[in-house]
């Protein structure tokens, strides 16, 4: 396969860093967009492994760092769930202009909640996949509980997330409140597949049930058995990719 570093502008004109992977020979039969988990980046192991496995099956994949993360420009403190959605739309537009509009979108963890919100604004999409995703962005509200009062009073505060310190502003908390229901999932009008581990300790399996109940058919659910939230075992990521290819062949 071929790998290319790419850059494209978000809604604020800041450059977002992406990695585009394509089959080594011939044109991919579809393009896919991958959204990583909260505070992670495009190079997290699960994203890399799933992307590579999809490319081997003839699907081109673009994964990128959200604003303020990884190699992308911007300040994480100025971002929120809504800006993540806008970043996804910008990535889709980049693919449309320079390669081919994405027909599949995949979101891991909070990235999954983001693709569920963004997908209905991307008419080229035919297939949507979530991996260990919460039904709504409000699920991560608890990560800020210990600093919520300080954030509200001072307008911002430093919060430790996944072992790293981020500056979080009150706009983040306000935005999470706005995205606290799964009502929009019923308006997807795309084929949906939900991957979730019943022993996921970060995002409980009940979130997958909420997504499934809110969505309309065609919808599918695949249990990831004893996989952890980050799909740290290569075999789990490759299993997701294999199932994605088999499932999406009906819709792409």
Image (spheres, rainbow, N blue to C red):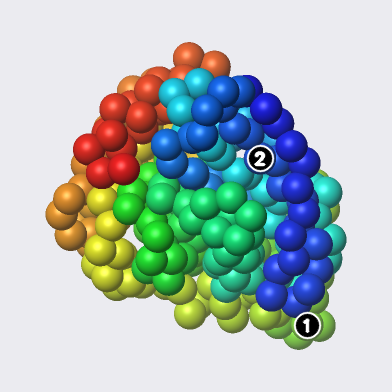
Callout 2 secondary element: strand
The quadrant of the picture occupied by the C terminus is top left
Instruction: Answer with left or right where residue 59 lies relative to residue 83.
Output: left
Residue drawn at 21 percent across, 48 percent down: 219
Instruction: List the residue tagged with mark 1.
Output: 155
> Can I make out residue 229 in this image?
no
Instruction: Answer with left or right where residue 165 lies relative to residue 222.
Output: right
Instruction: Answer with left or right where residue 78 lies relative to residue 42.
Output: right
Callout 1 secondary element: loop
Nearer to us of marks 1 and 2 is 2
Name the image quarter holding residue 96.
bottom right
Instruction: List the residue tagged with mark 2.
Output: 20
Residue drawn at 49 percent across, 44 percent down: 32
Residue drawn at 47 percent across, 52 percent down: 102
Name the image quarter holding residue 181.
bottom left
* Distance in Å between CA atoms under marks 1 and 2: 37 Å
Q: Percent from the top left, x then y, of residue 166?
A: 80, 58
Disc 2 crowd rating (10 Å Cα; few below 14, some 14-19, many 20+) is: many
The quadrant of the picture occupied by the N terminus is top right
């Amino acid at each position: 396969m071929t790998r290319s570093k790419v850059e494209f502008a978000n809604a604020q004109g800041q450059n977002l860093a992406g990695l585009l992977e394509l089959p080594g020979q011939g044109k991919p039969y579809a393009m896919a967009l991958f959204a990583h988990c909260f505070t992670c980046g495009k190079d997290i192991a699960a994203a890399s492994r799933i992307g590579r496995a999809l490319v081997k099956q003839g699907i081109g994949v673009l994964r990128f760092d959200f604003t303020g993360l990884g190699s992308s420009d911007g300040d994480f403190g100025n971002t929120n769930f809504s800006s993540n959605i806008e970043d996804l739309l910008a990535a889709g537009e980049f693919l449309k202009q320079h390669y081919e509009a994405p027909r599949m979108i995949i979101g891991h963890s909070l990235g999954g909640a983001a693709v569920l919100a963004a997908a209905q604004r991307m008419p080229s999409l035919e297939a949507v996949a979530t991996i260990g995703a919460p039904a709504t962005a409000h699920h991560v509200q608890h990560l800020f509980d210990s600093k919520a009062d300080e954030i509200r009073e001072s307008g911002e505060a430093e919060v430790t997330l996944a072992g790293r310190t981020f500056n979080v502003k009150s706009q983040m908390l306000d935005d999470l409140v706005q995205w606290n229901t799964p009502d929009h999932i019923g308006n997807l009008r795309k084929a949906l597949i939900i991957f979730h581990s019943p022993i996921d300790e970060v995002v409980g399996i009940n979130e997958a049930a909420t997504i499934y109940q809110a969505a309309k058919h065609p919808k599918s659910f695949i249990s990831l058995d004893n996989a952890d939230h980050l799909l740290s075992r290569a075999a789990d990521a490759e299993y997701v990719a294999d199932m994605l290819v088999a499932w999406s062949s009906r819709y792409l």
